[in-house]
Image (cartoon, rainbow, N blue to C red):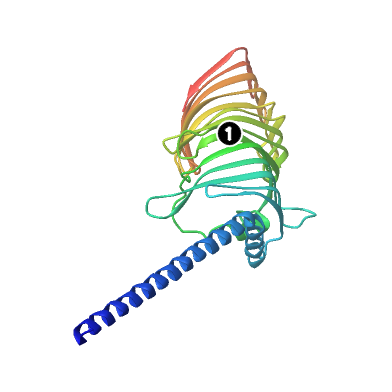
Amino acid sequence: MTSEETVETGEQESATVVVRRRRRVTRVFGLFLVGLLLFLVVVALTLWTQRRPIANDILSRELGRRGVQATFTIDRVGLRTQQVSNLVLGDPRRPDLTARLAQIQMRIRWNGQVEFYRVVARGVRLHGRVVNGKVSWGQVDRLLPPPSGKPFSLPDISVDLADTSIAVATPFGPIGVAVEGSGNLTGGFKGRLAAASPALDAGRCTLTTMRAAFDVSVAARHPKVSGPLSAASFACPASNIAIAQPRFDIDSRFTEGFDRFVGRGRMSAAALSAGVNQLDRFNADLSFGGDPTRVLGKVRLAAAGARMAQLTAARTRLDGS
């Protein structure tokens, strides 16, 4: 064998060794990748199967960090739907919020942001009180975002509410409200709202046994309310005014911030007295518009009888502004 052949044979053997080493490294690296992939799959499956305990722990820590007492059961944790049941927020003896079931649905937008687009609630009981002109919901306030200073706007979210009620203690008296309905709050929502109070005393005037049953809807960010509001009596002793069995059927639309409104309605009562003046069994058609500080409108009134000082009349009509 010549020296050239010896060199060529040595190069071939070296090349064979290099190829074998590369194959061995490639095989080891491939096995490492497969092992890493299997490990990640096992971790993902473990996290997925244990997602409820993990979510429960995270949620409990976050509520505790905000100083909110809470008990709940996590029923579902998914990529799109989250659901809890038997939710209690606040002092268990007098909770601020309870819910038999609450479900939140979300989606990931093309820019990566998470959007909450639908809320389903059943058996919700919310308790609040008016303090210094503002409504407080107890420990629930600690979960609400801070005031932005911007005008109020309806959230772009769909809701599905049933068996939901709100109780508010005000300086004038207690008010209870029940709500049900579904649809997007910026447009398309339709539902019903019922309200009641044994007595509302504003100091100069008192409304007793108040009842309301309204149809509520939202179209193009404009809420609409229609339905009857009635009471056993309305009295202002200082002004010597009293209305027996008043009823007001309202049909009104509001701006998004509820700062302006326009509507029409019909008012009736068994009797209205102002000092020695009185209207018996009257009905009035009203049209009105304005804001909470100034209301303008027109009235067409008809009464079965009227008395003004020493003057009496049978059927009476009045048209005015």
**In the rendered view, would you say 179 is above or below 110?**
above
At 38% from the left edge and 70% from the top edge, which residue is drawn?
23
> Which percent across, then down, holds residue 51?
62, 56
**Outermost residue, bottom side:** 3
Q: How many marks?
A: 1
Neighbourhood count class around disc 1 (C-alpha, 10 Å): few under 14, some 14–19, many 20 upward: some
> Which percent across, then down, holds residue 313?
62, 14
**In the rendered view, would you say 26 is above or below 188?**
below
> Image quadrant for the N terminus?
bottom left
**In the rendered view, would you say 7 is above or below 192?**
below
Give the left or right position of residue 294, taking residue 206 as reference: left
Q: Is residue 131 visible?
A: no
Q: Is residue 81 visible?
A: yes
Along the line of sight, the residue nearer the viewer: 74 or 51: 51
- Where is residue 166, by image quadrant? top right
**Outermost residue, right side:** 93
**Outermost residue, front side:** 1
At 63% from the left edge and 45% from the top edge, which residue is drawn?
102
Q: Which residue is mark 1?
A: 181
At 47% from the left edge and 33% from the top edge, which residue is drawn?
188
Give the left or right position of residue 144, taking residue 8 as reference: right
- Which amino acid lies under the numbered mark 1 shown in the image of this protein? Gly
Along the line of sight, the residue nearer the viewer: 306 or 48: 48
Along the line of sight, the residue nearer the viewer: 154 or 86: 86
Q: Secondary structure at mark 1?
A: strand
